[in-house]
Image: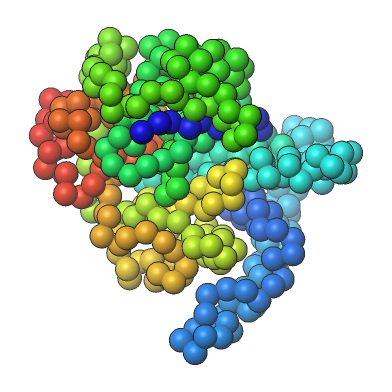
Amino acid sequence: MSIQVHFNNIELSVISIPRSKLWIFTNPIIQLLYDSIPEEDKHSDSGPSSEDGTASDDYENEGEDTETFINSTGSQFTKLSTDFNNSSRKSVDNSSKPQSHQTFTDNPQGNDHERHEESFFHVGLTQTECTIICSTRLTNKFFTQALALCKEMGYTDVEILPQQYLSLIVDSDSGFARSLRILELTKPLSENDVALFYISSHFNDIVLIPSDLRDRVQQILISEHFIFSESSNSYISTYDIEEREQPALLESHKKTFELLAREEIHPQIHEKHKVLLTGARPGEIKYCVLKTIKLISLANTSQPSYFAITRTFSNELSLVLPKSPKLRSRYGFKSTSTIGSSQDVLVPVAMDLSKLPLNCTGIVAGLANKLIIQGGNVLEIGYLSMAKSAVILIPKEDIDLVRNILKEF
């Protein structure tokens, strides 16, 4: 089994928001999500069908209602920001206003490709944090005002990471080798203390690398026997991962565990918050995006403890949803709009990293490496890196195994 890695050249920004302050970013997130829907689809009637095969009445009005809601909340947010600025001694710099769509009009032939590459975004929720990852251009367009407002109000726990990132899309296959693949691919980076983000989607795995290390990462791939394929515009491994040595616990990972022990940071198994790693069916991306908009607009206490929406550069939409059919139905995610088995239940294993510097490295890889090695190299896991927390998704049937491994923490 080979590995295929595609570089997305669009620079990404990462924002970390405490759940208690997510309300400030509700409208910017909704704008980001709504902007991801192609213009020609925003007012179409396509959507999940009712039992008689016709489009449901609720869905036909969804796009129009959502646009009205966005305009309304946008006006309210602007008023809140204006009122605060007028009462503050120091106003927000006008140069930080969101960019306009004019960026795309300079090079018409390259715009479609740029939009295609720029379509990647990720919004993840845990019990304590929301992490937003999208292109730096869209960050400037949608989030500048909210970030400036938080800065004016002294909310130091709302942060945008200073480093920009690039996404590596790693083709996925089923089986435990999927977990091994990410560790093997990033092992040389972990050994050199490169800060990484890991995100598992229903369709593939995603690794974020610092944008200024692109050339270095490419050289590492070449040294690890990857070759560049012009036909697929990606790097392809020339070896079978199953023929390579099984992973060993790196010295850097041992140091990571020592750091966690000093800070008294312990992995927590959140068995009460079981989830599914699923995706939108073909033709249902708009529907799932609109339902996510409704979910984000709910009060924090009504939102799920764990949720994620990830759109890859290929325009596939992945979702982390509650395992409970009742909860999924409450949020509007019907089985007819999503793919994946409801039997493949995952349990989050989370660590709160808010005590550590944002550039702390090797934590997700170290924990995953430890679980896989001590689990006999058969444990299949998923990844959900957050800016200030690390989350690994383990199969429900492996809870006892993982619990025994984590006893030493």
339 on left or right of 143: left
Task: Tell me, yes or no, if residue 117 can be seen here.
Answer: yes
Q: Residue at x 46, y 38 (%)?
A: 171
180 lies above or below 52: above
Towards the viewer: 86 or 391? 391
Which quadrant holds residue 103?
A: top right
Which quadrant holds residue 383?
A: top left
Q: Residue at x 72, y 37 (%)?
A: 137
Task: Tell me, yes or no, if residue 17 can be seen here.
Answer: no
* Image position, residue 385 (x, y; %): 41, 35
Q: Residue at x 56, y 85 (%)?
A: 54
* Image position, residue 304 (x, y; %): 39, 57
13 on left or right of 20: right
Q: Residue at x 26, y 54 (%)?
A: 345
* Image position, residue 17 (x, y; %): 51, 40
Q: Quadrant of the N terminus?
A: top left
373 lies above or below 321: above
95 lies above or below 204: above
Towards the viewer: 397 or 203? 203
Q: How many marks?
A: 0
Q: Quadrant of the C terminus?
A: top left
175 lies above or below 406: below
32 on left or right of 306: right
* Image position, residue 281 (x, y; %): 49, 63
Residue found at the far right of this picture: 106
